[in-house]
Amino acid sequence: MSDKKSSQSRRKFLVSMARTAGGVSLLGLGLGVYSRQSLSLPAQAIRPPGVADEKEFLSACVRCGLCVRDCPYDTLKLSGLMDDVAVGTPYFEARKVPCEMCEDIPCVKACPTGALDPELTRIDDSRMGLAVIADQESCIAFKGLRCEVCFNVCPVRGKAITLDQQHNARTGKHALFIPVVHSDACTGCGKCEHACILDEAAIKVFPHKLAKGELGKHYRLGWKEKQKAGDSLVTPDEQHEYNLPEGMRYDYEGEGLIQQKQDTPFTDNPLDRLNKGIQH
Amino acid sequence: MALETKKLGRDAINSKGWLAAHKWLLLRRISQLGILAVFLLGPWFGIWIVKGNLMSSLTLDVLPLTDPYVLMQSLFAGHLMEMTAITGALIVLAFYMLVGGRVYCSWVCPVNLITDAANWLRNKLAIKGGTQLSRNTRYWVLAMSFVAALATGTIAWELINPVSILQRAIIFGSVSAWMVVLAIFVFEAFVSQRGWCGHLCPVGAFYSLLAKFSLLRVNAYARNKCDDCMECFAICPEPQVITPALRGEEKNISSMIMSANCTNCGRCIDICSKDVFKFDHRFNKKISIKVLHQREVLP
């Protein structure tokens, strides 16, 4: 009887254990899937300075909002429950309020956990994203109209965005002032996107992984290699010589092998031939 | 026993007066709302005494406080925090080890306001039963939150943690706060009694681990005066913790409530018309903790 009772209580214990463990595992599975999905940051949501990798950031950010509080321009905001950014984490949307690139970087200083990299001390070194002329069809500079607003508001003036003068084929006599973004200087602050005069900005800040292409590692650009080496890496160009029989030369335009007439033992003039014996 | 939950607390009010019968409840509400108010002074009135939220905060620009639970999750996710956060977490750890970990639940956490309201309604409407969960589920959820952090490499639990979502939403002014309020209220009132705070919440589970050695305890020092009215069991969010202290006299168990899951809310002190309970320090007790722990039973 007592044996039966203890086996019943053991059974009860195991069942309740399995129930709890099973339920919590299901919850955990759901949470895992949800957390995977919440890694996909929408392109228009830009993280504060000092965030290199989204996953690394989400391993450190405790969603306290201290960076938001110390942002003097109310650029940063915390994601709400209904936003498509991981709940409670800081971000900004450049078209609404761009980053003003404070020199003392108060948001990074405020972060207690290191989610915003404390080693970022020069705001020019931050890489929040990368500006891209996303739509050349609407950007009025490509139509030959003078605008240059993005160039003029850029805080890394003359380095992150330059104007490339090109020939205006439509008028035949004017120049196009084409804005060109340089990734080695652009911080992704979003001032350009914010200032773009179009109804929908033609220049947009994208996350680096969306904005940047990458050349295959095996590529070597000859002119760069040459510059690096200070000299050409291939055999220096020399006057090419063909190894041809005596009296022959080669000329592609002159249609290949050419017999040099002067050196021919046999001439067209029969008198020469006749006189040859006399000369010897 | 036929305890009328609708009339809960009436005897205490009659014998002690309303104020004395709600002393600790009122102090607790002042503490809970006061903490929210201090956080809200900044964004609402520009008086920045405290910045941040319960996850991590900065008081008067000098005192950092960080939730040690979120720091541990971050560690599992593969990130070691900066010194500011570690210092803050150590201060919080020291504080709750002193006063009892689950003081966080009953004196600080804003979710407690909702679950207390839900249980008040439950008592008033005399709603009985509901989904029964094991009280140990919370420790499974706690372990799961660490496994989730390890597996995903992110602080995954924070995506759904109603404690921080609610507090953040209040402080940073987001309407989503009301969704959390409603969800927890409905769950506690109609689905599972004390289901969130007493059975599922890993934050409470984590803080209960800090209570093992805490100094501040509730003492059923006058347990011989107990008339078995059962009101303390009805009002207590963790009624299983009362049993050994209140009923252990014959078994020579200390009258000190030693369970880590006692939230030190003091509702038992308020509601007892015989003044059986009082706040005490743990060393004021008759027998050793060891004996007590062996005898403490979780339902």
Image (cartoon, grey):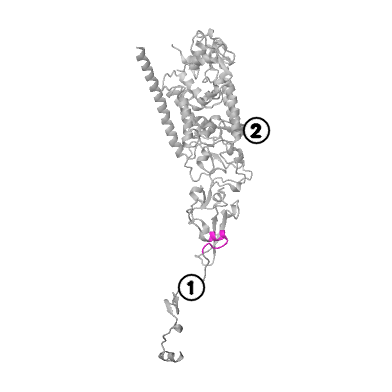
Q: Residue at x 56, y 23 (%)?
A: B107
Reply above or below: A244 against B273: below
Residue A66 against residue B207 in the figure, above or below: below
Which residue is disc 1 drawn over?
A241
Rendering quarter of residue A102: top right
Task: Kindly identify which numbered label has been placed on residue A190.
Answer: none
Specify whether residue B2 is painted magenta: no
Residue A143 versus residue A162: which sits nearer the camera? A162
Residue B37 drawn at (x, y percent): 59, 29
Q: Position of residue B8 (x, y in %)?
A: 49, 15
Front-lying residue, B90 or B233: B90
What's the mark number on residue B62? 2
Residues under labels 2 and 1: Cα distance?
82 Å
A230 within the magenta span: yes
| Magenta-tinted stretch | A223-234
Quadrant that contains the C terminus of chain A: bottom left
- Tell me which chain the residue with mark 1 is part of: A
Residue depth check, mark 2 versus mark 1: number of the one nearer the observer = 1
- Give above or below for B219 relative to A249: above
Judge whether A67 appears above or below A217 on screen.
Answer: above
The answer to whether residue B179 shows anywhere in this view is: no
Dot 2 and dot 1 within a common chain: no
Q: Amino acid at mark 1?
A: Glu
Kind of residue indicated by mark 2 = Val
Locate the N terminus of chain A by quadrant. Answer: top left
Percent coordinates x, y for residue A143 in the rendering: 51, 60
Q: Quadrant of residue B218?
A: top right
Secondary structure beneath dot 1 equals loop
Residue at horizontal 48 percent and vertical 12 percent from the top: B230
Does the image show residue A172? yes
Residue B245 spot, x, y in % from top left: 52, 13
Residue extending furthest front? A280
